Image (tube, grey):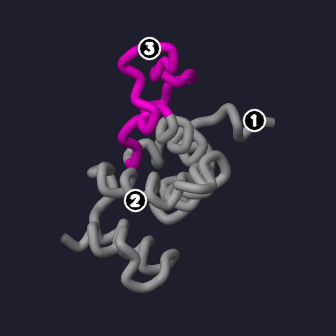
Amino acid sequence: MNDPRNTKNLDSLKFCIYYKGEEENPNNPQSPSYDRAAGFAWISESIACRHADGDVDVFLDYVISHMGKWDPYSFIERFGDYLLANTNIPLEDKIRFVEKNFVPNHPILAKLKE
């Protein structure tokens, strides 16, 4: 039986801006040019790709859940930055996700609608 932690869902890769199916994170924390946000998002996307089955809402649920687990005090801001940077997810899908999961008139929603 396949272990879901070791499988990739190619249908969800289309949503990723950092994870491209690599086995290990290519962002080296020891590098002077290390981008912490990119390294963190790579991990979140890699987890989401193992479970989302090509569904954008499930993909974003996994990304925000991972961010919330490992950065509980600033994950909303981090997730907002991620949504704004991610051009692989259609704007209408991002807006729908935020409207469904955040309080009305959340600043992330305003930024997406600019």
N-terminal label among 3 and 1: 1
Residue that sits furthest to the left in the current view: 114
Residue denoted by label 3: 31
Instruction: Locate residue 50: give its quadrant.
Output: top right
Q: Is residue 110 left or right of residue 42?
A: left
Is residue 20 visible in the rendered structure shown here? yes
Q: Amino acid at mark 1?
A: Asn
Q: Position of residue 99 (x, y in %)?
A: 42, 79
Does the rendering let one see residue 52? no
In percent of the image, x 41 and y 23: which residue is there? 34
Q: Residue furthest top?
A: 31
In the image as oriented, which residue stretches furthest toward the right? 1
Question: In screen coordinates, is 47 left or right of 108?
Answer: right
Give the image location of residue 56, x and y in percent.
45, 60
The residue pinned by badge 2 equals 80
Residue 2 bears which disc, if any? 1
Q: Nearer the viewer, residue 55 or 48?
A: 48
